Image: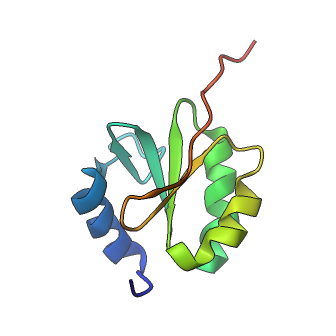
């Protein structure tokens, strides 16, 4: 699959996982498995995972498949799962824990 930009990735997420825009503005999109952030550009990846760290509940980051090595490294400590643009789970999201 060719590298997708943010708008193309948003359309792909809607098609592949049934995601829709997040009206709360906390995430880019939401779907039946949780909140979804889009990391289409390498320059935005660090910022996206920083945002993911602040989200409650199940959170996922959708990436272009070629960016898996960087995304996996940045995902450490965020509990975020990673999806490719086809909706394939590359890394499962960790179970959210209640803060004490």
Quarter holding residue 92: top right
13 horizontally vs 72: left or right: left
68 horizontally vs 38: left or right: right
Percent of width and height locating residue 3? 45, 85
The residue sitting at 32% across, 60% down in the picture is 13
2 horizontally vs 58: left or right: left
Q: In the depicted view, which residue is nearer to us: 37 or 65?
A: 65
Count of numbered circles in the view: 0
98 horizontally vs 15: left or right: right
Chosen colour scheme: rainbow
The residue sitting at 24% across, 50% down in the picture is 18
The residue sitting at 63% across, 78% down in the picture is 42
Quadrant occupied by the C terminus = top right
Q: In the depicted view, which residue is nearer to us: 47 or 66?
A: 66
Percent of width and height locating residue 55? 58, 38
Q: In the depicted view, which residue is nearer to us: 73 or 48?
A: 73
Which residue is situated farthest in the bottom direction here?
Answer: 2
Quadrant occupied by the N terminus = bottom left
Percent of width and height locating residue 8? 32, 76
The residue sitting at 76% across, 50% down in the picture is 76
On screen, residue 96 above or below 74: above
Percent of width and height locating residue 65? 52, 73
Q: In the depicted view, which residue is nearer to us: 58 or 54?
A: 58
On screen, residue 37 above or below 92: below
Which residue is situated farthest in the top direction here?
Answer: 100
């Amino acid at each position: 699959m060719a590298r997708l930009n943010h708008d193309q990735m948003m359309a792909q997420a809607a098609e592949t996982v049934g995601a829709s825009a997040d009206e709360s503005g906390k995430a880019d999109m939401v779907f039946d498995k949780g909140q979804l952030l889009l990391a289409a550009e390498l320059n935005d990846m660090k910022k996206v995972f920083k945002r993911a760290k602040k989200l409650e509940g199940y959170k996922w980051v959708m990436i272009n498949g070629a960016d898996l090595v960087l995304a996996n490294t940045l995902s450490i400590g965020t509990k975020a799962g990673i999806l490719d643009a086809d909706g394939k789970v590359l890394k499962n999201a960790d179970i959210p824990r209640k803060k004490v």
